[in-house]
Structure formats: C-alpha cells, structure tokens
Image (tube, rainbow, N blue to C red):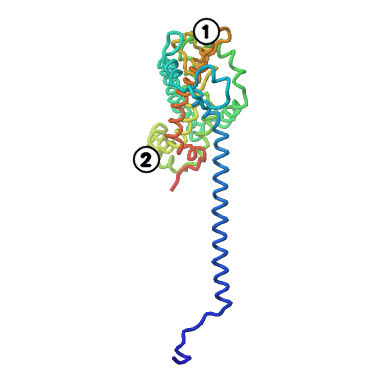
Amino acid sequence: MTPAQLPPTEPADSRDSTETSVQLRRAAKQRSRAGSIAYHAMMVLVSLVVLYPAIWMVFSSLKPHAEILGSVSPFSENASLDNYVTALAGIGGVSFWTFFWNSVFVAVMSVVGTVASSAVTAYALARVNFRGRKIWFGLLVGTLLLPGHVTMIPQYILFQQLGLINTFTALLIGNFLATSAFHVFLIVQFLRGLPRELDEAARIDGAGHVRTFGSIILPLLRPVLITVAIFVFISTWNEFLGPLLYLKKPDMYTLPMALRLFVDQTSTSNYGAQVAMAVLALIPVVLFFFIFQRYIIDGVATQGLKG
C-alpha cells in the first residue's frame, strides 16, 4: 500500500481531547444524578415532616382511646375500626350522616350563592359604567381590612330580630348578597384581563348587559369561578364559629360542631371517635381540592384569554 492509500490518522492531541470530553460528560452526569437523588431524598424527608400531623391523625383514628394521648407514635398493635363505628353511630341521638348532610347543604349552597352573587357584582364593578363605581369598589376592598369580629355582635342582633337564629339562613344569606369582598375582588381582577372588544362586539350585535354577561363573559370566568368555589367550599366546610353562634339544635349541627361534642371537660371525652370523625370529615375536602386544583393557577393568575 502506497503512502497515498494509507488512511488518515487522527492526531494524538485530538484523541486525548475527545477522551477528556467524554470523561467530563460522564462525571457531570454522575454529579447530576447524585444531586437529583439527594434533592428528591430531601424533598421526601421534608414532605414527611410536613405531612406527619395528617399521618398521625389517620393512624391514630385506629388506636384505642387510651393510646391516643399516651404516645406520639402513629402506630399501634391494637389497631381496629371501633372508633369509626362509634363515629358513624353519631352522638346525642344524631347520626354522623345527619351532621354530614348538614355540612354538605351549607357548603354547597354557600358555593352557589357566593359564586353567583360575586360574579354579578364583579361584572358590574368591572364592566358597567356608573357614577361612583371607583368609590364603591374602593369601599368594597376597604372592608377587607375590617375584622369579622367587629360585625359579629351587630350581625347576631340583626339576625335575632329577623328570627333567623337556629336556621341555615343565617349562615347562607350573606353568601347570596356578595358580602365576600375578597372573592369579588378576585373576579374583578380577572375581568380586567379580558379584552373590552368582546363587550363592544356584543353591543354592536344588540346585546345588553344581561346577554353579554351570560353568553360571553360568564363562560370565560370558569377558571376564576372554580377557584372561588374551592376557597368557599373549604372555608365553609371547616367553619366553626358561624354554626356555633346561630345553630342551637344538635340535629342542625355541621361536622365541626359535631366534633366538639366528643370532647367534654366535665365527663369522659372520646378522642378516638373524634379523630375518626375528623378523618371522615377531611375526605370530601381532599377530594374536592384534587378534582379542581388544576383550575386554581388559571384563576389566580388572572391572565384572561389564552391562545
């Protein structure tokens, strides 16, 4: 073979450079893999610390009454479902399902009332031009600075004079009157991200405010309305002070009120049944949140239309 026919040889410096690059890439991948493992291990550890109270509650609901306050460990050798049997049987002659359906009724009606009234009010403040609109909106936002305890006594006196004590109306009437300034403000901010050309096109076609709101604006509000529904459902489901003030009959109690019945400072307290009922009360909230959680970011981001 002549020198012209010999295959070209790669310089030694070039081969050394290639091998060095390969080694560096392998080392980088190993460091990246080790860092990823360490990161995920740390996140799992942090998650366990954060979720430990919930884990303890679930496992403690299976413990005998005597072991709940005597040990911080969530596990027990005497685990059973007796606490759930007691919780489902209810207390004071009222079954668990009565408390459960009372909570469902109050939470669902609160969601319906708040979403409907807040959407209409927000549309008026964001889209309808009327005298003093900015002043009314400023006063509405200003109520966020007012503690609820300030209005508690006047509101109770008003409801008492109207004969609304010991009725669900006292818990629900405010939701149908758009008294939740935060939710109205949230929807107003979302509406400001929607182009006004939609309203103008509707008016050119002869649509009024009712038609514009119902046919054009309302469908676009779905993300923020679902976000409001989630907030209202969770807060109403866990509400304790309202039912404590306005509900007097045990058969009208919601689940938070029912949980209190298992703890009696003057006699025996059944912490096992209380923890079991707390676990049962937590299930609807968790399911509701995970079903609709994907809408929360869209609702809070208030970015309006997306392509």
Q: Quadrant of residue 198?
A: top left
At x 42%, y 23%, the residue is 108
Label 1: which secondary element: helix
**How many labels sit on residues?**
2
At x 59%, y 13%, the residue is 153
Disc 1 residue crowd, few under 14, some 14–19, many 20+, Cα 10 Å: few
Answer above or below: position of 101 versus 122. above
The residue that mark 2 highlights is: 205
Where does the N terminus fall, quadrant-wise? Answer: bottom left
- Indicate the amino acid at tag 2: Asp
- Which numbered disc covers residue 63? none
Residue 64 in the image: state x and y as whole percent: 50, 18
- Indicate the amino acid at tag 1: Gln
The residue that mark 1 highlights is: 161
Front residue of 134/167: it is 167
Label 2: which secondary element: loop
Front residue of 62/283: it is 62
Query: Label 2 to label 1, Cα distance in Å?
Result: 49 Å
| Label located before the other in sequence (2 or 1) | 1
Answer above or below: position of 181 versus 35. above
